[in-house]
Amino acid sequence: MKWDEIPRAERSRIVRMRRLWATRSPRTFTEKVRYKMLRDHRPLIVTFADKAAVRAHVAALVGERVLPRAYAILDDPKRLMDLALPDAAVLKPTHGSGAAIVISPDAAPDTRLPAASESWVYRHVQPAAAPPEQLVAIGHHWLGQVYGQGPNREWAYSRVPPRIIVEEFLTTTTGGIPDDYKFFVFHGRCEYVQVDAGRFGDRTQDFHDRSWRHLPMSGGPAWAVPPPPRPARLAEMIALAERLGSGTDFVRVDLYDLGDRIVFGELTSYPAGGDSPFEPESFDATFGEHWAVPRRYR
C-alpha cells in the first residue's frame, strides 16, 4: 500500500480521536494491543519495528552474538545487482512484517519468485530462481510500500526508513529449518511461549506457559503432533527474551534455537496488528490479565 492509497480514515484526526475514546478501558489482549498502537509513540517502539535499527538495540542489551549475520543493508535496491550473495540468504524490507525472499538450495525446484507487485509475501526459492534483476524489482516495490495501514493503525512502521536487509539463512545444526519461538513478555516477564514450526511446509502452532504447560488454545494453525518437546535451552531463551523485553509494557520477542546458538528474530509490539485470533476466546482475556497498560506512555 502506498501513501496515497491509505484510506482517509487511517489518516483522519477525527477517526483517531474516536478510536482513542473507544479504547480507553481495554481489558483483553487484543484491546490492549490496539490501545498501544494508538498511544505508544515512543522512539523505542520505532526502533523495535525497524529491522535494521533494532540490531544495535539488541547488541547493546545482550551482545552481538545473538544477531543473525547481516550481509548488507541497502537504501537502493539496484545495489542487489552487484551484491555477491551466498547460496543461502534472506532478503526482507526493514519497515514491515510478513515479507521475505528466502534463497537456498533446499527450496522446491519449481518455486518461483512472485511478481514484484505481489511480493509482500514469504517465498522460498533456489538460487537459480532468484535472478538479481527480479530481486531489484521486488526491492523497488517493497520500498514504495507503507506497512501497517497508516498512522492510525500500526503507527511505528510509518516512521521506519524503508530499506532492504540481507541476512544469513538460518538452519539448525542438523540442517533443518528452525522452529520459531515467540515469547510474550509483559513488564519484563515472559508469561507465554508460542511455537511455530513448518514455515515452508505444514505449519503448526502451539502455545505454552513459561513452565512449558501446553495451553488448550489455538491461534489458527493446527497443533503439532506429537506436541513440541520442551526446549533444552528454554530457561536461557526466557532470560534472553526478558532482557530484550525490559523497558516496555509489552513486546513479543522472537528467537530461534539452532542447537549451537540462540538467534534473535524480531521484536513485535503489535502482534497480528491487534487482531490476534484466540480459540477459545476466553484466552484473549487471560493473556490480557498480565498487562497493565499505562495511562500515558513516557
Image (cartoon, rainbow, N blue to C red):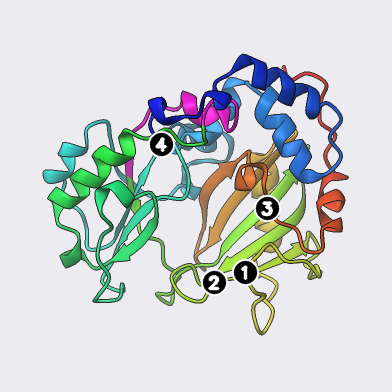
Question: What amino acid is found at the position of numbered circle 2 in the picture?
Answer: Arg
Question: Real-space Cα distance between discs 3 and 4?
Answer: 29 Å
For the residues bearing labels 3 and 2, Cβ distance under 8 angstroms: no
Of discs 3 and 1, which sits in the foreground?
Answer: 1
Element under label 3?
Answer: strand
Mark before the other along the chain sequence, 1 or 4: 4
What stretch of residues is rendered in magenta?
A: 150-165
The circle drawn on residue 1 is: 4
Element under label 4?
Answer: loop
- Pointer 2 residue: 203
Q: Residue at x 76, y 56 (%)?
A: 192
- In the image, taking residue 268 as reference, residue 130 lies left or right, namely left
Mark before the other along the chain sequence, 3 or 1: 3
Dot 4, how many residues are within 10 Å of its Cα: few (below 14), some (14-19), or many (20+)?
Answer: some
Question: What amino acid is found at the position of numbered circle 3 in the picture?
Answer: Phe
Q: Position of residue 46 (x, y in %)?
A: 54, 27
The circle drawn on residue 183 is: 3
In the rendered image, residue 107 lying in the magenta stretch gets the answer no
Dot 2, how many residues are within 10 Å of its Cα: few (below 14), some (14-19), or many (20+)?
Answer: few
- Pointer 1 residue: 221
Viewer-nearest residue: 233 or 250: 250
